[in-house]
Amino acid sequence: MKITEIIKKTAFDLLEAQPEGIRYSELINLISTQNPSFNKNTISGAIWNLDQQFPEKIYKADRGIFRLLKYNEEVEPEIDEKLKKKTPKGQLVCEGDFYKPFADWLVNEIEECTKAIPLGGNLFKDKWGTPDVIGIRESKRSDIIEFPTEIVSAEIKLDSNGLITAFGQACAYKIFSHKSYIVVPKESQVEDISRLDTLCRLFGIGLILFNNADKESPDFEIRARAIKHEPDMFFVNKNLKLLEERLFR
């Protein structure tokens, strides 16, 4: 075997033993420790882009951290198995019933996105969560001045008991989104909505109220608009790579 092949095999063996992943610099040191005769520059040249050489086996769990793809197979329940609720009309509704209506509302009503899709589940496969709805806003051919693509994410909560969790998730989405929204029931307690409104304005998160008793007419209402900010492009590309076909084609 060539030296570079031995280095890559050693890297795979080390990653196999570390399900949480190994940082790039640490991986170089570990390989060097096992094979002291190998030059560190040679090791670096062989592994710096392992995720690109073996995209079917390795990915970057975070900036500079390599991890085997097989250790990223956590699965959440399907959308229709999430929180369900009986409405006054006797309807049984679940969170997923409101994903597409809200995606359409973002595009057609407030024109915050040029395209938006329901998501949910655990597509991003990390503990920071996956948005229930994600969209993009791109320049139109008719626009005189073009602007960069913007990413918009949203977290929808069917039950008012999950407001704090929803706010935390919406905050986490800002790492890869230019705008983040939280969508909560109008029936939530007045003091809870008031406090959430204040927090959303402080953190630049959009707050939307909706009728969680009628999936046909959710009546989305803006309480606070999301403020645009610049996300971390590493996480933008990492997450949107999983949605390229659905969002950009």
Image (tube, grey):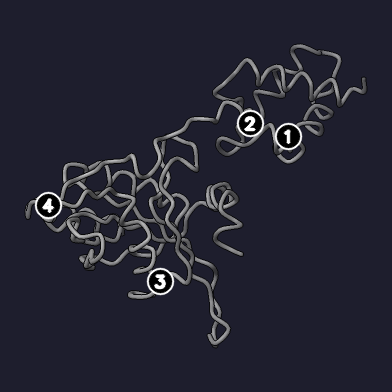
95 vs 238, nearest the viewer: 95
Nearer to us in this view, 210 or 178: 210
Q: Which residue is mark 1?
A: 50
Give how far across and how far down residue 11 sits, in percent: 73, 22
Residue at numbered disc 4: 188
Q: CA distance from mark 3 to mark 1?
A: 38 Å
The image shows residue 70, relative to residue 244, as above or below, that is above
Residue 73 lies, in percent from the top left, at 53, 30
Say if mark 2 contacts mark 4, CB within 8 Å: no
* Residue highlighted by disc 2: 66
Tell me which label, 3 or 4, sits earlier in the chain. Answer: 3
**Looking at the figure, which quarter contains the N terminus?**
top right
Q: In terms of sequence position, does the residue under pointer 2 or pointer 4 come before the other?
A: 2
Q: Establish if 160 lies above or below 48.
A: below
Nearest the camera: 126 or 159? 159
Asked if the residues shown at circle 4 and circle 1 are in contact, with their CB atoms under 8 angstroms apart, the answer is no
The residue that mark 3 highlights is: 107
SS type, badge 3: helix
Secondary structure beneath label 2: strand
N-terminal label among 4 and 1: 1
Residue 129 placement: quadrant: top left
Q: Residue at x 92, y 23 (%)?
A: 2
* Pointer 4 local density, CA inside 10 Å: few below 14, some 14–19, many at least 20: some
Of the numbered discs 2 and 1, the one sitting upstream in the chain is: 1
Q: CA distance from mark 3 to mark 2?
A: 37 Å
Q: Residue 140, image x and y in percent?
A: 54, 80
Element at label 1:
helix
Confirm or deny contact between disc 2 and disc 1 (CB under 8 A): yes
State the CA–CA distance, disc 4 to disc 1: 48 Å
- Residue 181 spot, x, y in % from top left: 32, 58
The mark that comes first in sequence, 3 or 2, is: 2
